[in-house]
Image (spheres, rainbow, N blue to C red):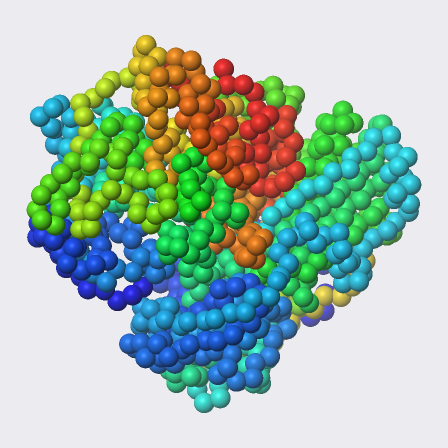
Amino acid sequence: MRAFTYQRAASPAEAAAAALKTPGAKFIAGGTNLLDLMKLEIETPPHLIDVNGLGLDKIEPTKGGGLRIGALVRNTDLAADAKVRKDYAVLSRALLAGASGQLRNKATTAGNLLQRTRCPYFYDTNQACNKRLPGSGCSAIGGISRQHAVVGASTACIATHPSDMAVAMRLLDAKVETVRPNGQTRVIPIADFHRLPGTTPHIETSLQPGEFITAVTLPKPIGGTHIYTKVRDRASYAFALVSVAAVIQTDGTGRIALGGVAHKPWRVEAAEKELPRGAKAVSAKLFANAVPTPENRFKLTLAERTLAAALLEAKG
Amino acid sequence: MKFDTPATTNPIDQLKVIGKPTDRIDGPLKTTGTAPYAYERHDAVDNPAYGYVVGAGIAKGRIAAMDLAKAKAAPGVLAIVTADTAGKLQKGNFNTANLLGGPEIEHYHQAIAVVVAETFEQARAAAALIKVRYTKTPGQYDLEAVRKDAPPAEKGKNDVKIGDFAGAFAQAAVTLDATYRTPDHAHAMMEPHASTAQWDGDKLTVWTSNQMIAWGAGDVAKTLGIPKDKVRLISPYIGGGFGGKLFVRADALLAALGSKAANRPVKVALTRPFMFNNTTHRPATIQRIRIGATKDGTITAIGHETWSGDLPEGGPETAAEQTKLLYAGANRLMATKLAVLDLPEGNAMRAPGEAPGLMALEIAMDEMAEKLGIDPIKFRVLNDTQVDPAKPERLFSQRQLIKCLETGADTFGWSKRKAPGTARDGQWLTGMGVAAAFRNNIVMKSAARVKLDAKGVVTVETDMTDIGTGTYTIIAQTAAEMMGVPLDKVVVKLGDSTFPVSAGSGGQWGANSSTAGVYAACVKLREAVATSAGIDPTKAVFANGRVRSGNKSVALGDAVGVNGLVAEDLIEFGDLGKKYQQSTFGGHFVEVGVHAATGEIRIRRMLAVCAAGRILNPKSARSQVIGAMTMGAGAALMEELAVDKRHGFFVNHDLAGYEVPVHADIPHQEVIFLDETDPMSSPMKAKGVGELGICGVGAAVANAIYNATGIRVREYPITLDKLLDRLPEVV
């Protein structure tokens, strides 16, 4: 871990301005991912801005009938919130499928969205990784890639996004509210928030330098049956091989988003139109341009079968 | 004391303390966080500096250049030791690769430097400033690719050829010829390797985490080139070892070197990412098993060939060993081949040999039973042997395999098992599997010193270790039983090289051997105490804190006087182990559910039935067995060091990537110990059980998966991707 300076921000705008002032500065909230990465010198911020005291820890109704979730709301609190459990059950279930109780107590809503990949080559500073060291290459390609992306990857990076929560957020069409260093706010639809790796896998979101997440909002509830199925090698405390978030209406229409398959939560709206035709048809559209590795080709079958099981479950 | 005739009745047989389920006497220290571990010896060492290990970034080659300038100038840095500055080092007797590499690099994350600084954070930050340029050499990292040319291990001295295997196999009515694969496994114990070192002139003290104190002290001395009597190793509490701490590792050496260089006590712990490539692991195996039988299920030919790899001068994973002894069969072939691989050092991990060997053999037995149309338990019973198949005149000291399997079948409800792929519980396909458990019983000489003081307190000193197994407690039980005092009148001191040399902890030899050593010392102490009390030692009875004979009864404290009495002895084992085959046996039963859509495998129930001699403390023995069953479940379903065959290292080098079971993976576990005493093993009549618990678990899980799905997987771990294409349609 490199030595760093530290400040407590007094307001979101001040946090954003401070972040712009010191290139490479990072916000720290729960620190469940950032501190680990700093210990390994994968992240080497010269300056940390502690945003825990900004009062962004409330869950409030919005005028449009939705919910505004403060950026600092802990995963445990969000998963347990009565409104979330009632109207956005898929989000609660996704949260509870992630990490451990201890980590969820610390991890925050915005921090969860900003998790870095768990690619083992990203985690080993002896190995080439375009995400960690742009231009150094990708060791995962041709290497151990069972956990890696099967769709939307590039020749520069085949990493996945590790979050469960983000998959549910994508399904629910959440919006990310931010404040920029100049004090202006903006709203980023979750679909535009996470990026595919392309040639710049080190740039993972559409946030601009210094831009600070203040809240995530959910539109008004959409009803339906909420399902989050996470498939993994052990029963708990593991990243998804594949996860399926689904909200299925009684008429068989609905939404589908997948985790564990791409550099971001994977949702293809056109694929959802195939829902009445079943999992195979939906999968075909979801994975139309899939390029799996020999080690992770099984994820295509697994995703389709997990989706089929979810649709069966939705029927009751 | 020489143990060379079968044990007769002795004070242990009173079973007033031995054999009773007993809470750990070290439990309160553990649960209150006051048991001092090697990295936390604030009580023993003042103002230690912190050492941080730098590991090689390549698997094989040479360091071309190493730039220490920035690290040396970094805040707080006191010293940096590399192979260039360490002075002449030798390799320890128990190490395959050098603990401090450079300029030659023998494996990935081999230690190449230790940075010593005032704080841990300063040492770590400075370590990251060391720039190393390497010249890589091509290495061999793929067991599959090199196994064809692998020569017999140790010139084939352990290989077995009995009768005409090839001929009998060719003529057998029913045959199986299948190849099984087990991956490299990590010990992944809770406490990483850690040491604190301090020099006093030319004397070195190392507080470390080590299973074998005398081996360790010897290898520290040898590596540093100093006399063994100048080295003191202290290791009273160990946060798990599983064989990974049988040997001195880089933490101990680098703490010693760092301490010398910095002229300060230094402590070094390996970080978790280092635990996988810097230390040892259980090597991967490829195992070919051939079984031939008559139509009625009598095995006529049994062959087990196994391949593994290790660094030059390393050893094999002896996965064919149990096949020499577990089942009958007139024609036999066992062969162990060893390839050279440039992966990190392979070595012992819980039940080396049998653990991966039974993962293969016991699937093969299941497959064979199915081919024969015989129940897998019945097939095993049919081929049981009460003698060493290689030397029929040699009996087993005890062998209750059949009773283990039959007791297990009754308890588990084996008769309810259905045909493969036909039992279902909602979305879950369910199935049951069985495997035999087998692990040899090794005995090792073991010494102890026992003191009795004027207050009647018995103190035991031996360099034996408690690696979380419950050794403190069984040693206290032994001394209490022998001296006729309650447990709270016994103090046990372990893990110090100034104490008499014990068996140490490994190969499930520790419990029986070390308590037998304490027994021997207590026999001597009893003589001295009785004599001191004026009682004929041959007639003395020790009970209720007193020694008595006839009408004479003296309190122990009074008997020994103000200075107390001390006795020391060791148990040495004669050739009973040659005359009789000493092994432990068991049956593992597992029920699994396999999700019909996703292929997720979840264990539902586990049962182990063990026959392993006298169980000294049923409570801690049960803990050992359920822990071993958990480890076996991990090996069956998830544990695998993923080898990058291009760069030669284990890629998943943290506990997020190397998955071991969590609580949610482990359901109800039941353990039954059969009533057994083994007079051939020691005066304790006990045997090892901590490794028996893992032996066969993997295959029982695999066989249960087969029973649930009809899918046979011969390559561990059995992950869902190996089932997916053959599962039923999701409807």
Report the residue at 39% width, 12% height from top.
A276
Q: Is residue A174 visible?
A: yes
What x and y, as percent, mark residue A50?
A: 17, 54
| Residue at (52, 73) in percent of width and height | B63
Horizontal arrangement in the rendering, residue B143 relative to residue B556 (left or right) = right
Residue B712, located in which quarter of the rendered image? top right
Left or right of B553 in this view: B712:
right
Q: Residue at x 67, y 57 (%)?
A: B309
Q: Which one is nearer the viewer's eye here, A20 or B583?
A: A20
Locate residue B564, reporting x and y percent.
50, 78
Q: Position of residue B642 (x, y in %)?
A: 54, 49
The N terminus of chain A, quarter of image: bottom left
Residue at left offset 22%, top offset 44%:
A207
Residue nearest the viewer, comparing B463 with A186: A186
Name the side, left or right, on which B146 lies relative to A270.
right
| B183 vs A122, nearest the viewer | A122
Q: Is residue B103 above or below residue B664?
A: below
Residue lying at the far top of the rendered structure: A251
Q: On screen, B708 above or below B611?
A: above
Q: Is residue B366 above or below residue A285?
A: below
Q: B607 or B354, which is in the foreground?
A: B354
